[in-house]
Structures are given as structure tokens and as C-alpha cells.
């Protein structure tokens, strides 16, 4: 490109200088308009808040209204369902610690002990199995990998053997060719000349010697020459044959090596395909095992609560068995209430003893859907006015015709609880999932559920944050979270909220 000097725009070039000034003003205005357009476009873009998918435990929480009854005494617990054979006290009686309140049938008691022990063992085994980590059988992968390694080694050995055979054949061919060249170079002497009689005119002292060739001696010389010639030709022919044979052997060795290498390579490729297939099957089995393990661990959490309750029940049964079936007073005090009658069955609470502190009991009803999750020992939150207590569910009664159950929570005597209404909130675990999002991030329409993911993409105005619509499957819901599956990863930026409607492909601003 030619270099232009500013001198060309001095006097005599004023028009060109003015054009340059106009062009400069035009580009400056264009720059201002571009910056304004970018600012205006950025202000018009939706502003979004994002979050990343994460592993989380989903829970199901529900509330119920109950009634607090202030008890005149503390309840003493019994193994439920045992036959009462004798009641030794009446309500209002003064008893000493360890005195007999009632007796139960010992045969039924022994059976109940054995049954509780078996049930506890079964629950413990179930819990241990549920807590086992994900496993998948990798025997097929290891076996196919060993075979692939053997195939690689065999292919290497076949290659080396073929190369050695070709090298040896080549060496033999080189030796045969050198021998042929040597044989061809070792030519016999030229044939002898025919004898010519010496005449007085041609005779000289040099030609007339005592050893002058005679016809008889010439014939002998010619015969010797022919024999030498025939022997030389035979040697050359033999060397040519050996060279041809060596050349054919080299070609055969090369073809055999190529065929062996192809066969070994086919075996290696087949072994590699088998290994890849086994590895794919193993990865699928491991993924399935991980999902199963997650579900099992969630169930194991529920089983753990059942184990605690069953252990407590077994301890009460064993204590009763050690006492010979006698229900003993846990401390000295007054029997303010007694729920035992001869011929009846023992309830979970045998009665009340004053002097053990004045506890309260909160009773409430759970509908069928809620009762399916209720287990003794599960966490509950009790609220009455400004009082809140984190405790566990004490008992769950049998279901009625509609599937509803009566449940109870014990409130400590020093908690300041008053008779009257209270609210209880129960929380049940629904499992741990690898990809969880706030429920607000999931959109649902007739074609299914989806989320908006923010990706940084190159545009005509530079790199911008652009919305991408990603279909997902909602696997489970719990509280404000939902477990999903789909084309998402832990580091993705998923939109949780926006200040205006969104659409796929739209450019957005990130909050914060």
C-alpha cells in the first residue's frame, strides 16, 4: 500500500482534509450510538438470579393440630399387647419404688421377647443392607481387560516373529545373491587357439620351440576348457537356483507375516470391543447400583428410627421378663391413673405416677396420607404460643376405617406447657438425590418440565449471557426442593427468578 503524507492535504488538498474530518466525526457519532444502544439493550434485558444443581436430602413436612393434656404424674410405659393376669393396685394408691402394680402372662411374655428379638435382628440386617455403598460386579471388565492385554502381547509376539522370519529370509537371499555374483565372476579361461604349423617363412626363434602345440595336444586343451566351462555354468546355475529359492522364501515369509499380523490384529480388535462392551455394561450397572443405594439409604433412615423404637420395646420386655412378669413401680409415688384390667391387654402406657414430675401429652390425628410416613421416633416440632420444642414422636396408634391414626408426643414437665391446643410439625425423609433445584426454577407445560440455563455465548456485540431451555424430569419433590434428571451438571447456572418473562435464546443480566 502506498504511504500518503499529510503534506498532500496541505494547500492544494483542502478538500481531502475536510473529508477526513467528516469521517472522524461520523465514526465518533457511530461509537456514541453503539454505546447508547448497548446500555439501552442491557437495561431492557431480564435480570435473573441463578443457582447450581446440588445433591440434597428431600423431606416431606406436614403439620397437625393437637391437644395438650397436662397429666397428674408421669406415664410408665409397657410392652403393648400382653395379657394382664392380675392388677395389684387401684388408682390413688401409694406405692413404693419396685412394688408390684400388676402381672402379665409369662408364656405370652416369653413369646413376645423372642418375636421382638427376631424383628430387631431383621431390622438391623435391613438397615445394614440399606447403608451398603453402591457396588457393581467388575469381573467381566477385569476378565475382558486381561484377554485384551493377552491379545496385545500376542499381536506383538506375532509381529516380532514375522519380522524375524523376514529378516532371516532376506539374509539368505542376500547370501545367495552374493554367491551368484561370485560364481558369475569366477569365469573359466578363454578357449585355446588352434595350432598353426610353422613354415620357414614364418618361423622365428620365438615360435619354434620344443613345446610347440600339436594337433593332439590342442584337442586335450580344448577338452579341458569345455570341462571347466561346463563346471562354471553348473555353478552359476546352482547359484541362480539358490537365489531364486531364497527370493521365493522371502516372499513367502513376508506374506505369512502379513497374514499372521492381520489375524492377530483382528483378535486384538475383537478383544478390545469385548472389553469396551463389558466396561459399558459395568458403568450402567454401577449407575443403577448408585441409584438403588441412594433409595436404600433413604429407607435405612426410616428403619433406624424403627430400630430405636424396637430396641426400647425389647428392653421393656426383657425387664418385665426378668421381673417374672411383674409390672413394678418405677419410683415411689401415687398412682393417679391406671390403664390395666385383668383379662385385658397391656397398653403402651400403663398408667400415671405422681411424684415423677408432671409431664404433658400432646395427642393429634394424622390423615391416611400423613400416617403412611409417621413412625415412632421421627423428628417433630411442637409449637404452643411462643414455646417451641424439638422432640420425637412417641407413639402411633392403629389406623381407623379411613386410615387415620392417633399419635402422641410427650412434653416435659418443666416446659411450661398449658392444657389446650398446640401445633405439631413432622418431617419425614424422602431420600437423597444428586441433582436438586428449588421448585421455583422448574417450569411445566403440556410437553413436560424444563428449566432455563444461562450460558455465555459469542454474539455480534461480544460474549453475552444467553438463556438455553433444558428439558428435565422431576424425579421427586420435597418441601421447596425437587430432584431432577436431564442434561444438567453441578456447575450449571439455572435461573431461579427473573424480573420479567423469559424465553429461550434471550440475553439476560445476572443479579448481583
Image: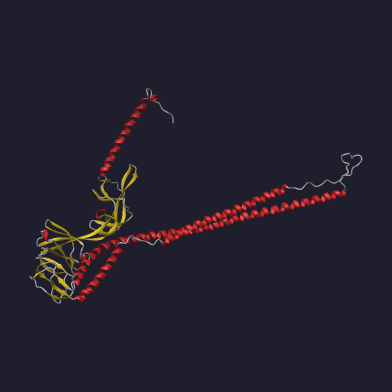
Q: Nearer the viewer, residue 506 or 222?
A: 222
**Residue under the image location 76 percent in, 52 percent down:** 231
Corner quadrant of residue 132 = bottom left
Q: Position of residue 401 (x, y in %)?
A: 18, 71
According to the image, what is the colour scheme of the structure?
secondary structure
Q: Is residue 326 above or below residue 264?
A: below
Question: Is residue 168 in view?
Answer: yes
Task: Report the residue that reaches farthest toward the top.
Answer: 11
Q: Position of residue 462 (x, y in %)?
A: 33, 42
Q: Quadrant of the C terminus?
A: top left
Number of numbered discs: 0
Q: Residue at x 39, y 62 (%)?
A: 137
Residue 319 found in image quarter: bottom left
> In the displayed structure, does residue 152 sit left or right of residue 8?
right
Q: Is residue 305 above or below residue 460?
A: below
Viewer-proximal residue, 63 or 357?
Answer: 357
Q: Position of residue 33 (x, y in %)?
A: 29, 37
Q: Position of residue 369 (x, y in %)?
A: 21, 65
Left or right: residue 161 versus residue 145 is right
Residue projecting furthest to the right: 200
Quadrant placement of the N terminus: top left
| Quarter of the image where one finds residue 32 | top left
Residue visible at 73% across and 52% down? 235
User: Is 34 rendered above or below residue 481?
Assistant: above
Q: Nearer the viewer, residue 453 or 184?
A: 184
The residue positioned farthest toward the left in the image shown: 92
- The answer to whether residue 401 of the structure is visible from this angle is no
Amino acid at each position: 500500500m502506498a504511504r500518503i503524507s499529510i503534506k498532500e492535504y496541505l494547500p492544494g488538498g483542502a478538500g481531502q482534509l475536510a473529508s477526513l474530518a467528516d469521517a472522524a466525526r461520523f465514526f465518533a457519532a457511530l461509537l456514541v450510538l453503539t454505546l447508547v444502544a448497548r446500555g439501552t439493550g442491557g437495561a431492557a434485558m431480564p435480570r435473573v438470579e441463578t443457582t447450581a444443581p446440588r445433591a440434597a436430602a428431600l423431606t416431606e413436612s406436614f403439620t397437625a393440630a393437637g391437644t395438650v393434656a397436662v397429666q397428674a404424674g408421669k406415664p410408665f410405659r409397657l410392652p403393648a399387647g400382653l395379657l394382664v393376669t392380675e392388677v395389684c393396685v387401684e388408682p390413688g394408691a401409694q406405692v413404693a419404688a419396685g412394688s408390684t402394680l400388676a402381672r402379665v402372662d409369662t408364656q405370652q411374655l416369653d413369646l413376645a421377647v423372642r418375636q421382638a428379638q427376631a424383628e430387631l435382628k431383621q431390622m438391623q440386617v435391613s438397615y445394614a443392607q440399606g447403608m451398603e455403598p453402591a457396588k457393581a460386579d467388575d469381573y467381566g471388565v477385569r476378565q475382558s481387560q486381561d484377554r485384551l492385554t493377552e491379545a496385545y502381547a500376542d499381536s506383538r509376539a506375532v509381529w516380532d516373529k514375522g519380522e524375524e522370519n523376514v529378516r532371516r529370509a532376506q539374509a539368505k537371499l542376500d547370501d545367495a545373491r552374493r554367491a551368484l555374483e561370485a560364481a558369475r565372476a569366477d569365469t573359466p579361461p578363454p578357449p585355446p587357439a588352434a595350432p598353426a604349423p610353422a613354415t620357414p617363412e614364418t618361423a622365428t626363434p620365438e615360435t619354434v620351440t620344443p613345446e610347440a602345440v600339436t594337433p593332439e595336444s590342442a584337442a586335450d586343451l580344448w577338452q579341458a576348457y569345455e570341462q571347466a566351462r561346463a563346471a562354471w555354468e553348473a555353478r552359476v546355475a546352482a547359484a541362480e537356483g539358490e537365489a531364486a529359492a531364497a527370493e521365493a522364501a522371502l516372499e513367502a515369509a513376508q506374506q505369512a507375516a502379513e497374514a499372521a499380523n492381520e489375524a492377530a490384529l483382528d483378535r486384538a480388535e475383537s478383544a478390545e470391543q469385548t472389553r469396551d462392551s463389558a466396561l459399558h455394561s459395568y458403568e450402567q450397572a454401577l449407575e443403577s447400583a448408585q441409584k438403588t443405594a441412594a433409595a436404600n439409604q433413604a429407607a435405612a433412615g426410616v428403619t433406624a428410627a424403627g430400630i430405636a423404637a424396637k430396641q426400647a420395646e425389647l428392653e421393656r420386655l426383657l425387664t418385665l421378663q426378668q421381673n417374672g412378669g411383674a409390672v413394678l413401680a418405677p419410683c415411689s409415688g401415687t398412682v393417679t391413673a391406671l390403664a390395666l384390667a385383668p383379662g385385658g391387654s397391656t397398653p403402651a402406657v400403663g398408667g400415671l405416677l405422681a411424684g415423677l414430675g408432671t409431664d404433658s401429652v400432646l395427642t393429634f390425628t394424622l390423615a391416611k396420607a400423613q400416617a403412611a410416613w409417621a413412625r415412632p421416633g421421627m423428628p417433630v416440632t411442637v409449637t404452643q404460643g411462643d414455646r417451641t420444642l424439638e422432640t420425637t414422636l412417641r407413639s402411633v396408634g392403629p389406623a381407623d376405617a379411613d386410615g387415620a391414626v392417633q399419635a402422641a408426643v410427650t412434653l416435659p414437665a418443666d416446659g411450661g406447657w398449658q392444657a389446650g391446643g398446640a401445633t405439631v410439625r413432622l418431617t419425614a425423609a424422602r431420600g437423597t438425590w444428586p441433582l436438586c433445584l428449588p421448585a421455583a426454577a422448574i417450569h411445566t407445560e403440556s410437553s413436560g418440565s424444563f428449566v432455563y440455563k444461562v450460558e455465555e455465548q459469542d454474539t455480534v456485540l461480544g460474549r453475552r449471557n444467553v438463556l438455553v431451555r433444558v428439558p428435565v424430569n422431576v424425579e421427586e419433590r420435597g418441601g421447596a426442593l425437587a430432584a431432577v434428571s436431564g442434561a444438567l451438571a453441578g456447575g450449571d447456572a439455572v435461573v431461579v427468578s427473573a424480573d420479567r418473562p423469559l424465553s429461550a435464546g434471550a440475553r439476560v443480566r445476572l443479579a448481583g
